[in-house]
Amino acid sequence: MSRSYLDHASTSVLRPQARDALVEALVALGGDPGRIHEEGMAARVALERAREQVAGLLGARSREVVFTSGATESIAAAVWGATARTRGRAGQREGHDATDGTVHHVVTAVEHSAVRHSSERAGDVTIVPVDGGGRVDADAVLASIGPNTAAVHVQWGNHEVGTIQPVVDVVAGCRERGVLVHVDAAQAAGRVPIAFTELGADLLSLSGHKLGGPAGTGALLVRRGLRLPPLLLGGDQERARRAGLEPVAQLVAFGAACAALTEPVDDASSVTRLDAEMAESVRLTDRIRSVLRGIEGVTEYGDPQHRLPHLVCVGVEGVEPQGVLLGLDRAGVAAHSGSACSSESLEPSPVLDAMGVDAHHSLRLSVGWNTTDADVDRLAAALPEVVDGLRALAR
């Protein structure tokens, strides 16, 4: 039976361009890019080309791209680096050891658990509430900044409900106050245009696997001129900003996925693949919304005006989400419920809880570069039957 994958917000399918680049690099590149022999130099050239491709997608300078294993590591590096920087400055001012003193981070109530947990481990945290659509007020974020604030953390777009945050206003306010700002773009990169240099953020994190690259790849963009202590110590890879031998073949594939998004859809068009995929995602998710509106007791979550193009999150009254997911899976449809990384724990979604909506009965459907109308058709045929069947059992 053919299947329909509607869980691209968790991880997307490897793009053909990335797959081909990965296979070629695995065969051709075996040297350490930090060495000056021919094999090492070939690896270095390929690695730097990948860096340029990632920077090209994100509107950044190539030297601002620090390769990591994914957004989780990038976020941890951003939090740790900002924390260590603030402690070091406090030590210089007050004449005590740089490891003394409490630092402070500002996060929104709907940030990914990687941001929340890293910030809580680093020091004091102010959690800024959101409205019923999951959107934060930029002034409330800026009002939470204090004298010991190491960084403000804000998502570009939410991983569960797709709400886009007022990133431009938050970044501008932080720059005026001289406070570092970190943008989590894991869900937005490859889905909407991003111009890092123009935005003016200090730090931006993303994963390769969410935009069609291989798992185990990602990047932390670090604004030119900003010096942060590294999270990982050892070698001087990534210009001493991230220790450890780079997985060149995987990063080449990451770069190829990014490059594919910046290319025109065909020789006769100026429309990039990113633009085309955005438009197609909107069309497909609109179709999904039409399916959902035909089912009684379904409520859509998220901000209706400010949202990412590729995902839809709803509450389904009267059924347990695990039953819906299993029923859809048997019908050949892969979907998700709750927090993107908490399915094993079966805990209520902290994002939905922060929004003040039902955090126990959510269903998230997300499309990607290879989603077709046939996938939505399969969902339309399966979901009403699954929900009706579960409700009948519950009577």
Image (tube, grey):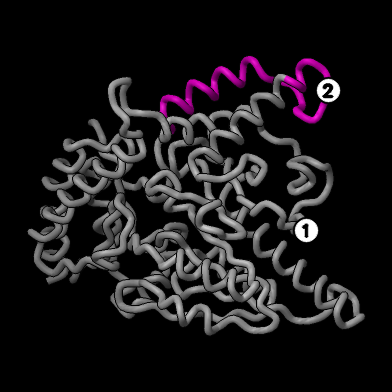
388 to the left or right of 100: left
Magenta stretch containing residue 15, yes or no? yes
Figure label count: 2
Type of residue at label 2?
Ile
Give amino acid for label 1. Answer: Pro
Write down the residue under mark 2: 36
Asked if residue 260 is positioned above or below residue 124 in the image, the reply reads above
Residue 339 in percent (x, y) is at: 41, 62
Q: Residue at x 56, y 17 (%)?
A: 24
- The picture places residue 298, in percent across and down from the top left corner, at 16, 66
Residue at coordinates 61% horizontally, 36% vertically from top-left?
51
Residue 329 visible in the current orientation: yes
The C terminus lies in quadrant: bottom left
Q: Residue 272: x percent and y percent?
A: 35, 34
Locate residue 280, reporting x and y percent. Answer: 24, 41
| SS for dot 2 | loop
Which label is found at residue 60? none
Residue 229 - label:
1
Q: Earlier in the sequence, mark 1 or mark 2?
A: 2
Residue 123 vs residue 98: left or right? left
Picture residue at 52% right of the left edge, 79% below the top = 142
Q: Is residue 151 magenta?
A: no
Q: Could you tell whether 306 is left or right of 295 in the image?
A: right
Q: Nearer the viewer, residue 304 or 247?
A: 304
Q: Which residues are magenta?
A: 14-41
